[in-house]
Amino acid sequence: MITGSDRWDEGLDVMVEGEARRVTDRATLQRLADAWATKWTGEWTFGVSDQGFTHADDVSDALVFAIEPDKILAFGKGTFSHTRYRMR
């Protein structure tokens, strides 16, 4: 999984390496759906099914995955720094 900015001269890019696993536990999915609704002030609201997230505008479920990290890399842009963190 990679997250960051599309700018080359500012921001922080983070890369997480590890095994991705499907999340199907309803309690976990509900906790995640509640967190997204709070973070995005209700703009992203999801229902929960046995398969993942549901949305009123969508026909199918959205599958949800969690990554158990093995290694995390972070790249600072502009100052051009980097670091590595190994989980094991």
Image (cartoon, rainbow, N blue to C red):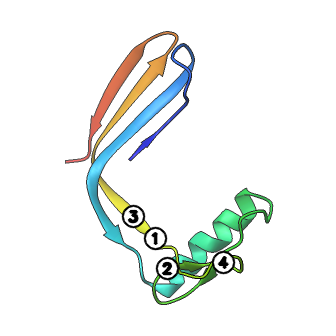
- Residue ID for mark 3: 66
Real-space Cα separation, disc 1 to disc 2, in angstroms: 6 Å
Label 3 vs label 1, nearer the camera = 1
* SS class, disc 3: strand
Q: Are marks 1 and 2 in contact (CB under 8 Å)?
A: yes
Residue 67 or residue 44, whichever sits in front: 44
Label 4 vs label 3, nearer the camera = 4
Q: Is residue 34 above or below residue 39?
A: below
Real-space Cα separation, disc 4 to disc 1, in angstroms: 13 Å
- Residue ID for mark 2: 52
Which of the 4 quarters of the picture holds residue 47?
bottom right
Of the two numbered discs 4 and 3 on the same chain, state the one appearing first in sequence. 4
For the residue carrying disc 3, how many other residues have a C-alpha within 10 Å: few (<14), some (14-19), or many (20+)? few
Of the two numbered discs 4 and 1 on the same chain, state the one appearing first in sequence. 4
Q: Are marks 3 and 1 in contact (CB under 8 Å)?
A: yes
State the residue at coordinates (25%, 46%).
87
Amino acid on which disc 3 is placed: Ala
Amino acid on which disc 4 is placed: His
State the residue at coordinates (67%, 72%).
34
